[in-house]
Image: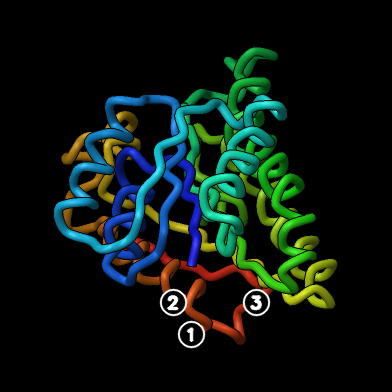
Amino acid sequence: MVTLITGAGSGIGRACAVMLSQRKHQLVLVGRSENKLADAADEIRATGSGDVMIARADVSDPEQAKSVIDQTIERFGRIDNLLNIAGIAPSVPIDKTTKDLFTEVFATNIFGAGYLIAACWPHFRAQKGGCIVNVGTLGSSDPFPGFFVYAASKSALDSLTRSASREGRALGVRAFSVNLGCVETALLRSNFNEKMVPPHKTISAESVAATITDCVEGKRADDQGKIILMPSP
């Protein structure tokens, strides 16, 4: 199995990469920081058994997104799973919202995922199958204060999941959204300290990775095209 993971250098993306490598997946690690990707690749090579490719890219640029898929096909000959995990979540009051904020958040959280799905689609069609997992937030249905733009971008990501599931059904393509509460990652701690969100009130990145892995491995077939909720404890 060939699996492409965005945001693979840290947090949930890295946890997924480690878990799937132990299941002998061939991995494409995508992100903006080559150092983080290289560090993740070193960990995977030390503990896993699948081949690993690094692709430093900003997939909010459609040309870079397509290039990543082209590189994947050139290296492995196919792509089986696309995990859209990369995201940003700036906490900004509504009255401080700017055009630049909208542009940055939507480009990262929704455009990149959409470009990658579109670039994968011809390969999924030719293979008669594929799996997409989009990682979102509980905030898309129950918005958290300060995440006016972030929640909107993840609501759009939920829509991509539903569309990909409906259109992909005849092609053997499966699509899922995994929408999260507070996950113990650097992204969470960039907005909330441990007094505001105690560690015991968070989900581990590894538990999220396990749910995503279940989607990939066909263990969540009944949730195809649906939103899988993972609230905080």
Question: Which numbered disc covers residue 224?
Answer: 3
Question: Percent from the top left, x then y, of residue 128?
Answer: 75, 73
Q: Disc 2 and disc 3: Cα gap in Å?
A: 12 Å
Mark positioned earlier in the residue sequence (1 or 2): 2
Q: Nearer the viewer, residue 80 or 223?
A: 80
- Please give the residue where the numbered disc 2 appears in the rendered image: 214
Q: What element carries label 3?
A: loop
Quarter where residue 193 is shown: top left
Q: At 41% across and 59% down in the image, what residue appears?
A: 26
Quarter of the image with the C terminus is bottom left
Q: What element carries label 1?
A: loop
Please state which amino acid type lies under the numbered disc 2: Asp
Q: At 34% across and 31% down in the image, what residue appears?
A: 191
Please state which amino acid type lies under the numbered disc 3: Gln
Pointer 1 and pointer 2: residues touching (CB < 8 Å)? yes
Q: At 35% across and 26% down in the image, what residue appears?
A: 34
Is residue 135 at all visible to an observer of this figure?
Answer: no
Pointer 3 and pointer 1: residues touching (CB < 8 Å)? no
Pointer 2 and pointer 3: residues touching (CB < 8 Å)? no
* Number of residue marks: 3
Question: Percent from the top left, x then y, of residue 52?
Answer: 36, 49
Quarter where residue 148 is shown: top right
Mark positioned earlier in the residue sequence (3 or 1): 1
Mark positioned earlier in the residue sequence (2 or 3): 2
- Please give the residue where the numbered disc 1 appears in the rendered image: 219
Is residue 130 at all visible to an observer of this figure?
Answer: yes
Query: In the figure, is residue 168 to the left or right of 5?
Result: right
